[in-house]
Each structure stands twice: as C-alpha cells, then as structure tokens.
Image (tube, helix red, strand yellow):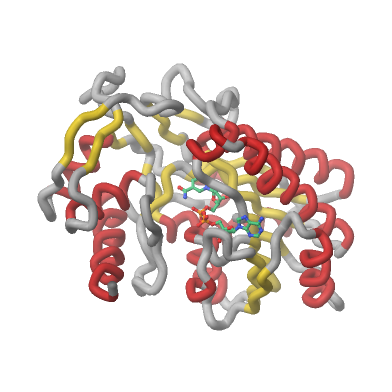
C-alpha cells in the first residue's frame, strides 16, 4: 500500500517508516525537520521537506504522489510536543498542532485521501480519579499541549462525518526505546523524557538526575507512568491500516497497562549502571499516576506490547551508548 507519513523524520514517525518499509509498503514522508532529522528517514522512503501549516507545499506533495491513486492512509505524527513550552507559548502549539492539522485534513479531502491515523496522547486525560484510563475516561487535559491534541481528535471526528473519512486516533502513553538495528532512536539535547534522562545519567552524559516530587500518593511517593516500546507503537500503526480499510473509526489507547514509578525505573536502570539521583520539588502539570487500559487495542487490533520495561531500557541504553561513542 501507499502510505504518507507526516512527521516521519521524528522519533516515532521514523520507527513507523522502518516498520512499514519492512512490511513491503511504499512510504512517502513529509516533515519540516523542525524536530526531526533527514538521516532518520529510511533510504527507501520518498521525502518532502514541507510544513503542514503551508497548504500550498502540502498540496503540491499530495498532488505529486496522489496523481493516479490517493494514499491508502496518512499517518500524522507532526506536532510540537513539549508540555512546559506549550504552557509558555500556547499560540505556537495551537497554530502548529491544530491549524497545521486542519490544513492537512483539507489537503487530504482535496486529494481524495480518506484514511488517517493520528498520534494523540495520554495527556488528553489529565488527572483522573484512579490513574487508570480506558478510552471512555473523561478527558481533562492539564496543558495546552494536551488541549491541542484533544482539539485535533474532535476536529478529525467532525471531518470524518462531513467528508466520509475514517480515522484511528491512538492515545500513546510514555514511548521509549530504540530500533533493534540501533540506526534510529531518540537522541536530542536536554531531553525531558524520563527513560532517556535516567539512562543518560547512568552512562555519565548527565551528572545527576532530579526526581520531581517524592510526596505523591503512590507506593513510593514518585510519579507512576506506563512505558511502551516505540517498535510496539509502530507495529500498532500497521494493524490500524486494516481497521481503516474496513471503514472503521476508533480512538484507541496504546500503553502496556502496567505502571512503574520513577524510582522503580531508576532501580531497573541501576541493575546495569549506577544512577546518581536526588529528590526535588514537584513539577507543574505532573499527575501522580497515569496508566493505560489497553483492552480495546487487544480486542480490535489483536495488539499487545511485545517488549517490557527491561527491554525498553536495554534498547535505549544500547542506542545511547552507541551514539555517545560516535560523539
Ligand atoms: N514521544 C512520546 O512519548 C509521545 C507520547 C504521546 C504522544 N506523542 C505524539 O506522537 C507524535 C510523534 O512524537 P515524537 O516523539 O516522535 O515527536 P518528534 O518531535 O520526534 O516528531 C515530530 C515530527 O514532526 C515534525 N513536525 C513538527 N511540526 C511540523 C510541521 N508544522 N510541519 C511538518 N513537520 C512537522 C518534526 O520535525 C518531527 O520530525 C506527536 O504528535 C506527539 O504528540 C508522543
């Protein structure tokens, strides 16, 4: 099939492109490289450097690729993703994430593309009563980032109704790990992601790690999160193509259904390397616990995570050690 991956030079998008190409699909990547790198795009994928807020550039790419046949599916990963930045600059987040998606949807309609898979987030739930979320848990985002994702979910729903589109909205929990080839992974300066931060401390890229808050109402006082390997996320996107081909539209959590506290993650990494950490104050916007129910993904897609916390840490560690050696 012919699949367009928007944001395919970024972390999760690039892994999905690898998975799609391995499965024999033709892949076209669109990315403005604002947070992605050209070298992460699989050499067998076509690449367009375009911004989703630029309707003309987007339409040109779609026209070139969809001349005879529209894309079988568009996978939309492109977004600004840093929660504190979204609090400081909501305008940027609404423009890029919401307005950008509106122009992408318009261009899809114009070019007869009716299937979209959208990367949403557990951040749409905010703080919940139990900390365990299924897709019916009320949404209450605690940041402009989460709000923009929820706004896009709703916009996609209305577009689907009006223009006969199908959608699969995936709400990812905490994505981590690297590709088994170690060619791609998450590699950036000053990352706020939990597992890379712990692993970087373990291998000496950071001096020490601050745990934000030790007085939450959890087993050890630190925040509990649900970690999921990036390759498991990528695999779910392949399964979703079949769902869309059956004209189904769904919102589905992608998580492991298991929660690990920050301290438990540090303990797991400490089995391999010493981690220098200390406790600091709580960080604004952090909820005590957020864990997925992944029952719907199991039932509808036959999907369940193949890799657990130990494998996620091993793969991130191997990737980070390789990148540190390259320099
Ligand atoms: N990483 C996680 O744990 C996580 C969790 C939940 C949801 N998500 C969602 O998954 C998606 C992918 O996340 P990621 O971690 O791979 O982020 P990323 O920043 O690595 O990837 C996003 C890609 O989109 C591109 N992009 C951003 N704005 C663009 C624009 N206006 N036009 C064209 N390209 C643009 C960036 O250059 C980047 O390559 C995002 O939508 C994010 O909200 C990620």
The quadrant in which residue 57 appears is bottom right
Quadrant of image for the C terminus: bottom left
**What residue is at 34 percent from the left and 55 percent from the top?**
307
Question: Of residues 55 and 180, which is closer to you in this image?
Answer: 55
Front one among 245 and 202: 202
Question: Is 69 rendered above or below residue 105?
Answer: below
Residue at the far front: name it. Answer: 88
Q: Where is residue 152 in the image (x, y as percent from the top left)?
A: 70, 41
Relative to 64, say whether 265 is above or below.
above
Q: Quadrant of residue 281?
A: top left
Q: Which residue is drawn at 75% across and 46% down?
A: 99
For the image, the number of numbered tags is 0
Q: Quadrant of the N terminus?
A: bottom right
Q: Residue 187: x, y in percent?
A: 38, 61
Ligand 1, seen in the image, is in the quarter at bottom right
Which of 124 and 79 lies nearest the eye of the viewer?
A: 79
Q: Which of 296 and 1 is in front in this view?
A: 1
Q: Where is residue 83 in the image (x, y as percent from the top left)?
A: 50, 38
**Would you identify the image quadrant in which residue 58 lies?**
bottom right
Instruction: Indicate whether 7 appears above or below 287.
Output: below
| Residue at 58% over, 78% down | 24
Q: Is residue 244 left or right of residue 209?
A: right
Asked if one can make out residue 295 in the rendered structure from this viewpoint, the answer is: no
Is 276 on the left-hand or right-hand side of 288? left
| Residue at (76, 52) in percent of width and height | 247
Residue situated furthest bottom in the rendering: 44
Residue 299, above or below 67: above
Residue 120 seen in the figure: yes
Where is residue 149 drawn, in percent x and y?
Answer: 63, 39
């Amino acid at each position: 099939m012919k699949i367009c991956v928007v944001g395919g030079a970024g972390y999760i998008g690039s892994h999905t492109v690898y998975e799609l190409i391995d499965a024999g699909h033709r892949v076209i990547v669109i990315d403005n490289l604002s947070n992605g790198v050209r070298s992460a795009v699989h050499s067998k994928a076509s690449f367009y450097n375009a911004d989703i807020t630029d309707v003309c550039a987007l339409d040109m790419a779609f026209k070139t690729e969809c001349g005879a046949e529209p894309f079988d599916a568009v996978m939309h990963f492109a977004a600004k993703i840093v929660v504190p930045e979204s609090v400081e600059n909501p305008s940027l987040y609404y423009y890029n994430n919401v307005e950008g998606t509106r122009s992408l949807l318009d261009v899809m309609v114009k070019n007869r593309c009716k299937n979209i898979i959208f990367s949403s987030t557990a951040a749409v739930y905010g703080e919940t009563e139990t900390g365990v979320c299924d897709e019916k848990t009320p949404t209450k985002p605690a940041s402009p980032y989460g709000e923009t994702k929820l706004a896009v979910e709703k916009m996609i729903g209305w577009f689907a109704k009006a223009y006969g589109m199908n959608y699969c909205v995936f709400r990812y929990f905490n994505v981590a790990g690297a590709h088994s080839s170690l060619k791609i992974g998450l590699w950036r300066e000053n990352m706020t992601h939990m597992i890379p931060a712990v692993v970087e401390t373990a291998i000496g890229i950071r001096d020490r790690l601050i745990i934000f808050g030790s007085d939450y109402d959890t087993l050890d006082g630190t925040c509990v999160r649900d970690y999921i390997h990036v390759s498991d996320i990528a695999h779910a996107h392949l399964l979703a193509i079949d769902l869309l081909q059956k004209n189904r539209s769904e919102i589905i959590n992608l998580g492991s259904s298991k929660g690990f506290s920050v301290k438990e993650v540090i303990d797991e990494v400490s089995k391999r390397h010493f981690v220098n950490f200390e406790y600091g104050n709580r960080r604004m916007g952090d909820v005590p616990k957020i864990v997925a129910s992944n029952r719907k993904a199991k039932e509808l897609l036959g999907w369940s995570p193949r890799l657990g916390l130990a494998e996620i840490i091993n793969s991130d560690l191997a990737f980070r050690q390789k990148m540190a050696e390259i320099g």
